[in-house]
Image: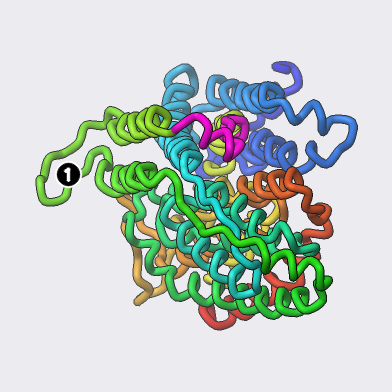
Amino acid sequence: MALLLAPALSQAAEETASPAPSVPFLLLWSLPFVLILLSIALLPLLPRVAHWWERNRNKLRVALGLSFLMVFYYLFRPAGFDGAAAGLGSVGRMLKHSVLDDYVPFIVLLFSLFTISGGIRLTGDVPAHPATNVLILFVGAILASLIGTTGASMVLIRPLLQINSERKHVKHTVVFFIFLVSNIGGCLLPVGDPPLFLGYLRGVPFLWTLHLAPEWLAAVLTVLAIYWALDSWVWRHEDVESLRLDEAIREPLRLHGWRNLALLAGVVGSVALLVPGRPLPLIGWRLPDLFLREIVQGVLCAVSLWITPKKRREDNQFTFHAIAEVACLFVGIFITMQAPIELLDLQGARLGLNSPMHFFWASGALSSFLDNAPTYVVFFEAASHLHAPAGVPLLKILAGGGRIPMHLLEAISLGSVFMGANTYIGNGPNFLVKSIAEHHGVRMPSFFGYMVYSGLVLIPTFIVLSLVFFK
């Protein structure tokens, strides 16, 4: 390995004497980040390795193997790229930033929302009229911002499937559920979708995402209107026996696990209030940077596991496999993304992205096929290094001390969250919902069949929204 990389290291060492670091050198060391994202996107689709990739330990092996290349890079790279020499100190700074500052808060929050929401169960059966499904999808879109897209998806997908179990045609309803509950709905709070939480960790105020409410409402109502028209047509073409059975079976809806809702509120409150290095509102005490927020979230998880009956989690088919998958993959993502971020620090202004329209579609296009959380970070860093025209409002990013144009941050946030719905691999809950639906006997569209839905429904919707909001 050292012999193969020696020429690149030598070339970069020569170029450190020049004012600008070597872009080809940084591009070379961005390959581990690209490889881990391609692994997530392609390995599940390749028959020869799909079964091997299903095991979380193999995902962790790939993630740690590519992360080791980043450790090698920071250990031996030429000095000068970050104003400091290479070596163990450089590795330590990189790991502190990527793992302790970003990964740990990120995965603890997701784990908390995932675990606590697994103790909530909605039971019952009502007629699956188009209006009923529209109401569930709208409630889910609201819930996604409050308890996260993963939490809302877990709470509502099984009740939705139960309500529609007598109908013959259900897959379009699950697809729109992924659109709205697993993606678009989660853009109003940082706990709603992973990209926004990463922005929050970088200093974006907790309630800033409420600026996205007009776009959120426009997208939700537009997609709901399309769904209502489609489901009304499908409902009229259901066979008479299915509709008769659907009307005959009625069971009142009941929500089990109310105490877990209070615990979820506690998680949201911890994110909003327990910010390391900032004083508590009204009290003024400055919190130590000792993972107090994450400790509180962990305690709330423990309480949820203690007070929730085991049978309720079994009825929800709750396991830790999905969140373990996220944990295994994202430790590699957060470490390997450091080289691309360095590259954007140096070259962000030269990418040709200078308008909200550019950032909306660029971040959205990558979020469609790669995970939307690292995609958000990449374009966040690019936008933070652009010089905004006079008169454009800037948002101070406290975590880094810099500023980012607000209209660009809005575009990046919406592109990353909204367009994670374009494919099964754009956001973590997408595949989770697909798997649960198939387990309940719903024949879901193939990878490309799903993209037909998103191409016909979401892309035109996003074109209209971008023309309206990003002129």
Say which residue appears at 65% left-offset and 54% top-offset.
162
Q: Which residues are magenta?
A: 309-326
Q: In this rendering, is residue 88 above or below 329?
A: above
Say which residue appears at 46% left-offset and 29% top-offset.
99
Which three-letter amino acid code belongs to the residue tagged 1?
A: Pro
Near-viewer residue (347 or 276): 276
Does the image show residue 8?
Answer: yes
Near-viewer residue (128 or 115): 128
Apparent side of residue 68 relative to residue 54 in the rendered image (left or right): left
Main SS of the magenta segment?
helix
The residue singled out by tag 1 in the image is 279
x and y, in percent, of residue 82 in the image: 45, 35
**Quadrant housing the N terminus:** top right
The question of residue 296 being in magenta is answered with no
The question of residue 312 being in magenta is answered with yes
Give the quarter of the image for residue 291: top left
Secondary structure under tag 1 reads loop
Apparent side of residue 48 relative to residue 206 in the rendered image (left or right): right
x and y, in percent, of residue 19 in the image: 50, 43
